[in-house]
Image (cartoon, rainbow, N blue to C red):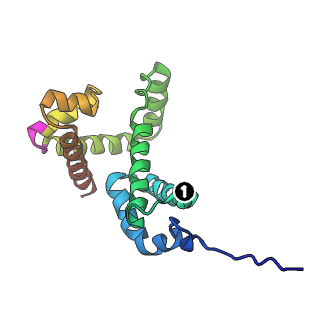
């Protein structure tokens, strides 16, 4: 009787397969920084990072070798980041403030005047920081935040590409965050 020899083949030796463990060891910090530049919320960025590796492990057998494995991994991250923004920024607007909600908030403030003072201070700091921004950035902020314009609508009204709106908004957020942390 002939013995049947089985051979164990790891993912890295298969044609077209990619070694996700090796990518994790060599690219994790770069990939983490890449995602965090796009997604400011640290927890959400971590989620996208984990999803990137899960998707890479799930589809590592489909890697065709048409690009470097690092490029393929970063491509997955780009797609997941894009999906994150579609999911989080295409939500319907918030509900209107009802009398019940308003009375609950007022009750919290009346029970703890320190909360009111803290909120007033934060509001004045934010208002001061916004007024320190250039006028075109203030105008863009007003359109997006107050008028609830989409980024595309703001870009059309200002006559600039949507990428310009995103980059200006990103810089404005950084400036506001820095001003409020100081």
Q: Residue furthest front?
A: 1
Name the side, left or right, on which 182 lies relative to 90.
Answer: left
Q: Which residue is mark 1?
A: 59
Q: Kindly identify the residue that appears in the image at 24 percent across and 52 percent down.
A: 174
Residue beneath the point at 49% across and 29% down? 104
Left or right: 142, with 5 as reference point: left
Q: Nearer the viewer, residue 132 or 104?
A: 132
- Whether residue 46 is situated above or below residue 89 in the rendered picture: below
Q: Badge 1 local density, few (<14 within 10 Å), some, or many (20+)?
A: few
Q: Position of residue 45 (x, y in %)?
A: 43, 55
- Where residue 39 sits: x, y (%)? 37, 51
Residue at 29 percent across and 30 percent down: it is 150
Magenta part, dominant SS: loop
In percent of width and height, residue 118 lies at 34, 45
Depth check, front residue: 181 or 16: 16
Residue at the spot x=48%, y=57% of the render? 52
Measured along the vertical axis of the image, is residue 157 above or below residue 66?
above
Quarter occupied by residue 83: top left
Quarter holding the N terminus?
bottom right
Horizontal arrangement in the rendering, residue 42 relative to residue 1 (left or right): left
Per the image, label 1 sits on a secondary structure element best described as: loop
Q: Look at the image and give the residue range highlighted in magenta.
A: 132-136
């Amino acid at each position: 009787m002939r013995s049947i020899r089985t051979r164990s083949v790891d993912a890295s030796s298969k044609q077209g397969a990619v070694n996700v463990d090796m990518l994790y060891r060599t690219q994790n910090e770069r990939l983490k920084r890449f995602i965090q530049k796009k997604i400011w919320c640290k927890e959400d960025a971590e989620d996208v990072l984990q999803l990137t590796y899960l998707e890479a492990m799930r589809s590592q057998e489909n890697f065709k070798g048409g690009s470097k494995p690092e490029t393929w991994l970063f491509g997955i991250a780009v797609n997941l980041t894009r999906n994150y923004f579609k999911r989080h920024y295409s939500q319907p607007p918030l509900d209107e403030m009802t009398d019940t909600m308003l009375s609950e908030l007022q009750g919290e403030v009346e029970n703890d005047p320190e909360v009111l003072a803290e909120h007033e201070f934060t509001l004045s700091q934010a208002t001061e920081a916004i007024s320190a921004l250039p006028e075109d950035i203030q105008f863009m902020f007003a359109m997006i935040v107050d008028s609830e314009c989409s980024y595309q609508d703001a870009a059309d009204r200002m006559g600039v590409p949507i990428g310009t709106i995103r980059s200006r908004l990103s810089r404005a957020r950084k400036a506001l965050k820095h001003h409020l942390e100081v």
